[in-house]
Image: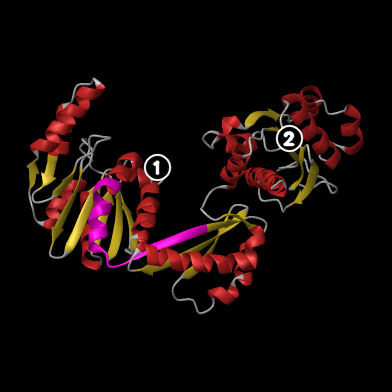
Amino acid sequence: MKATILAVGTELLFGQVINTNAAYLSSRLQLLGVDVLYHFTVGDNPARAASALERSIAETDLVITSGGLGPTQDDLTKEIIAEVMGVNLVLDEGVLSSIEEFFREIGREMTANNRKQALIPEGASVFYNDVGTAPGFMIEKNGKTVVALPGPPRELHHLFQKDVLPYLERRTDGVIRYKLLRFYGIGESSLESKLTPLIDGQTDPTIATYAKEGECAVRIASKRKTGEEALAVVDAMEERVKNLVGEFLYSDDDRELSAVVAAKLMARNLTIASAESCTGGLFADSLIAVPGVSKSFDRGYITYSNESKIDLLGVPKDIIETFGAVSEETAVAMAEGARERAGTDIGVSVTGVAGSDGGSAEKPVGVAWICVCGANGRKTKKLVTRDRGRNLNRHIFMLEMMNQVNRYLSSQI
């Protein structure tokens, strides 16, 4: 089955809203063995939207639209679908009742224009929306299927899982399963080079490398008759990948590095405190994003100035005067100060030059010192990276903090 994803909304073209729905739908369709050939985005223009829909129907078997199902005058997706498919819009009393009930539950009066959302193309199967007012629907004609889903991601995800996925599972002749392995400490070109024996001449399973800011990933995928068969093939290839580059692997289940670190901390009942200068709290923010980590993350110090390092962490003034704020000695004093004052098992720190100014010949932009300390000693790391811009430098420094904590925890196993 070949598919097109058609997003409707002028706000998408203007860049006011990022189209995350297309990425979500593509990733889900891949798992079902559906080949996505096109992503189209059109504004709230009936003629252009109709043209895009006609082309999509002509060239693919399945078209999934997102957006344009709301109550306002510029929400015209269902009208366009009805016109292109040659059917009328009819009032669906069941949908109307569900919309009325939705407004009763939230204690608001339903306005007249919300009745428009109960108009459905004749002959379409309705997807009742339990988390919003706009229903989705599916209509089939001449071997072609058009699925209309609302634009808000929460509603689109809900209806896809509840209604679209079961339908597609009955229609597809194969299932794709994949794993995304995450790596840190190796570049994409080096990663691909080491995996060349597996990549050359590949058919099924397939292996692809991806670069992300500061890290890499490998996607292993297989398409088989059943999910169990596909997963068995993927697992076998995963072991071959690990044999070649396992030293850089930090996750075999697509978890972020922060999630891996948080899980290890929580599993071992260990606590941690952070002291950040150039990253300005990115480490703490990334760790706190993991649910349940309050069990392990005690506090984070943002000590940007020299005075704050001295006042909040107890870094000796003479260390900063002698070695500078960006130095191994200062990083050690920061990590030990955070651990001692918070009373945690582990302390981690970073001090560096993120840019765009502030660098020198001795300590250029892109240099940072990181320290992790605990009952079993401490480890320091000097990170030297080319200047990639202030925010990306900060992100890379944060990743190296996570990496050093992860390595410290791995050494404690």
The answer to if 171 sits in the magenta stretch is yes
Tell me residue 369's x, y (percent): 78, 43
| Mark 2 lies on residue | 347
Amino acid type of the residue tagged 2 in the rendering = Gly
User: Which part of the image, by quadrant, shows the N terminus?
Assistant: bottom left
Q: Which residue is mark 1?
A: 17
Tag 1 and tag 2, C-beta contact below 8 Å? no
What stretch of residues is rendered in magenta?
Answer: 161-180
Asked if one can make out residue 325 in the rendered structure from this viewpoint, the answer is no
Q: Residues within 10 Å of mark 1 (few under 14, many from 20)?
A: few
Q: Which mark is residue 98?
A: none
Q: Nearer the viewer, mark 1 or mark 2?
A: 2
What percent of the width, then of the height, locates residue 361? 84, 49
Image x and y of residue 34, in percent: 32, 63
Q: Is residue 223 left or right of residue 89?
A: right
Question: On screen, 86 above or below 285?
Answer: below
| Three-letter amino acid code at the position of disc 1 | Val
State the SS at label 1. Answer: loop
Q: Residue at x 23, y 62 (%)?
A: 171
